[in-house]
Image (cartoon, rainbow, N blue to C red):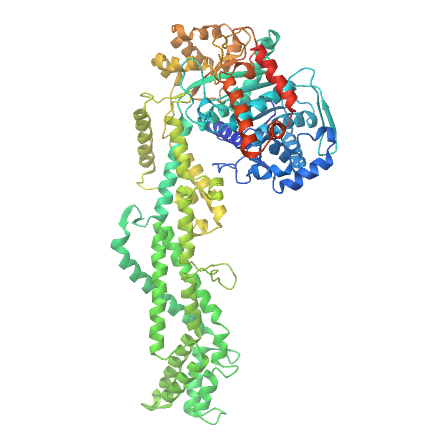
Amino acid sequence: MAKPTLLIGIGTSGLRVLEETQKFYFEHTGKNKPGNVEYLYLETDESSFPSTTVLKNEIKRVYLDLSDKETKINNLKDQLPESESHWIPDPNYIKDAGKGAGGMPAFGRVALWSYPNFNTVKEAINSAFNKINNHTQVDSDNTRPAVFITGSLTGGTGSGVFIDIAYMIKKHIQGLEDVYGLFLTPGRDYMGKDNILYCNTLSSLCSLEKFNQPEQEYHMSWPDSTTTKINDLPFEISHFISQDRNDGIAQVKSLSGLYKIAGLWMFLNIFGLREKRDRRLVDSKGSAFIDKYGSFGIAAVQYPKRQLEELLGVDLSINLLNRWIDPIAYYNKSNKNQIKAVRQRIVSDTITHFERTLKNAFDTLDATIVDGENRVLSDLKIKAEQINKKEYTEQSAYHFIKRWFSSYGDNNYYTAVKNNLQLAEDELIQRIHELISTTIDRTENLQISKIQLSAISDAIKDNREYWETLGIHPKPEKWENLLEKQIKWILKSRYKMIGEQNAVVRDRLKTTFDLMKIHLMAERVWRLKKNITDETDPLKTFDGNITLPKIPKIDQLIKNISHVIDSQDRNNNSNKKNKTLQSRYNDIESELKDTTIPILRVYKDGSSPEAFHRTYDSAKTRYFTQTGKNITSKKTIIEEASLWDYINTSTDKLHTTLFRDCITKFESDVIRLACFEDMDIAEYINSNPKESGKMALIAKTPLIMVNNDNKTDFVEGKGIPRLVIGKDKSQIDKVFNALQNDTEISYLNSYVEDEDGIWLNEEISNIVIFYVEQGYMSNGDSFNPLKHIKNIGDIKHVYELEKERYSKTKGIGHETWNILRNPYMNEEEFMEIMDVNQKQK
């Protein structure tokens, strides 16, 4: 098992590397990390967040709050001894810092040192180590934790905190094995476009060189009131990579591609590469082959089965969510119907259903208890007999009827029904909810339910207009006017045959009671219509368990689901935080087709885009054949549960829930159904040795351009780590047999004779990786980026140009410039390091 490991990303680039590391681990294990590994991410930009992942994102964000910079700066100046506060920038330059650290290393360091940020970071580090140390190791040599710090040195956060973080870890973590650095430097393409990137890189390299001197002591009074003295290098070794390479090897096309390579390297290290390479590094350091700095070349031949499975899972997820919000068509079972063609039938069926619902709601009021024990319908019969027999105490039948139906009365029909209106409203809400929920489950289309709710709204409007023609109005005085007419009608010509007298009066009383119910319910029914269509909070049943579906709610759900598929608002911070299905699909497809990163993606019949599409399309066809369906369904995600209940949740939770559930469930289905067949990657290399051999050759060329003076280049040394990584020995043997006759990659032959040149790991499947570490130069020097990066002279020149430009355009003198750019050294120290390395070139 690999050692307990903490990976720390600093700045946005550090986050991206950790995200790629996490993705690699997921691709190979189905998990985001092992139990003895933790990811931390330090950021000064409040808008930067880890992206949504299929599983719970394991990258813990530690935000270094830089709001109110002036107060933080003044507090630090008061807190630190004068001899140690020379690096703190003047508050007057806050406006130039912009968002977060604003590309200024001094403000990045201020962010770390400010209260409560320093303690927050310290607590996060201690918490992470407590977690990874809780995983007991069988091998006692593997119990000492290691730390990898990664990020770009071009921004304010990374260049401002990377030294402090290394020493902070050395101070607070007991039994630490060591701290390793992986840092991204800018390629040539940014020169003249964003020169500050190079200024920050140069200041960082000089700071690192300062603390890499054996006699240099890290001596600081920290914000937690402790004084720290450490006589040790910040990093055991610092690796540097960029988009540039030597030997005519194509640049890594994009920064995201470089993140992916860095993520692969970090992934291999937490998987056990570090232990494998350490055996050689001990020898190489003893031979002065690799000292404090290094780089590496890495390349691979991969059948990207897990990525393909996730890609199809994402594709099917998009297919499903598009089905849910499709405004053009819906499916009834497996039959596709055009919504426009059946819209009128949907409206007609909905109105019929609502009329029944309305009647049922009114009928619930018939069970109202009056006179202490009688239901209304039974009591109306009694009242009819009393009228005909004149068995009442009122002065007339008119007053008797008035007493029971008037809004001015008490303990009568009017009051009894009024006190039970919530029952009828609950019936309406419940039945409308049931209709919408049932329809959504049957059609899996929210647009159909919008049509239904609109039809219900229109039906209520039509009913209201009809009620008004009958003189029914929710105002009590209007009811009293109508009641007068009803009483006259009840008492007029009410007798037919003597035996029918009671029935006639009872029927007329029942009609009046029905009109009264409509009068009392009219306002609530109209409120129901408004609530269906307006933006107010939804009506609920009395117990709060059932909520009335609303058109705005469905519109919002459609919008939210469409944002899960693909958000159009690229500037919205919440969208930056929440990954979309389409962006994930694009990322995976782009990665699979990217030929500028040193990973050759191969399929059974080749490595071309056409081979990719044939493999993918065949698997997608196999999915639908295996499931026996031609469409995706909610059942894959939630089985028989209610779709309406599932999606009817808060906006933020819905995005994450849909993103994770859909991809996870569909990808599980794709894996279960074996849509993508296994492939022997070694057999492919054996059948395509020339194409595969190019990857082995690329691995010899490190991901940084050196040979600045056309005299020095990286050369191989016996103790420098060179590895071929695969699943098992038979696989590696096939690779060697296929490539051994290629003279350009004859360096592989030495691996066969050296067991440390082969690394077998059964969990690393469908991939063969070639790894060559570099750190020894052809002139006998150990690699030093200040001397050997090819464009270091240009970087130094740009640094001086920018220093002069800031002086002329912004009035920032050289001393202030140095404070803003070099928080770890004064100007004299900076120039001395520059001069020493210039002479040693």
Front one among 160 and 751: 160
Badge count? 0
Image coords of residue 312 (percent x, y): 37, 34
Front one among 780 and 501: 780
In the picture, the quarter occupied by the N terminus is top right
Image coords of residue 836 (percent x, y): 61, 14
Image coords of residue 238 (percent x, y): 58, 19
- Residue placed furthest toward the left: 341
Front one among 623 and 682: 682
Q: Residue at x 69, y 28 (%)?
A: 172
In the picture, the quarter occupied by the C terminus is top right
Q: Image height check: is 654 above or below 826? A: below
Q: Residue at x 60, y 6 (%)?
A: 287
Residue 178 seen in the current view? no
Image coords of residue 603 (percent x, y): 35, 22
- Residue placed furthest toward the front: 808
In the image: residue 79, left or right of residue 724: right
Residue 32 seen in the current view? yes
Front one among 593 and 797: 797
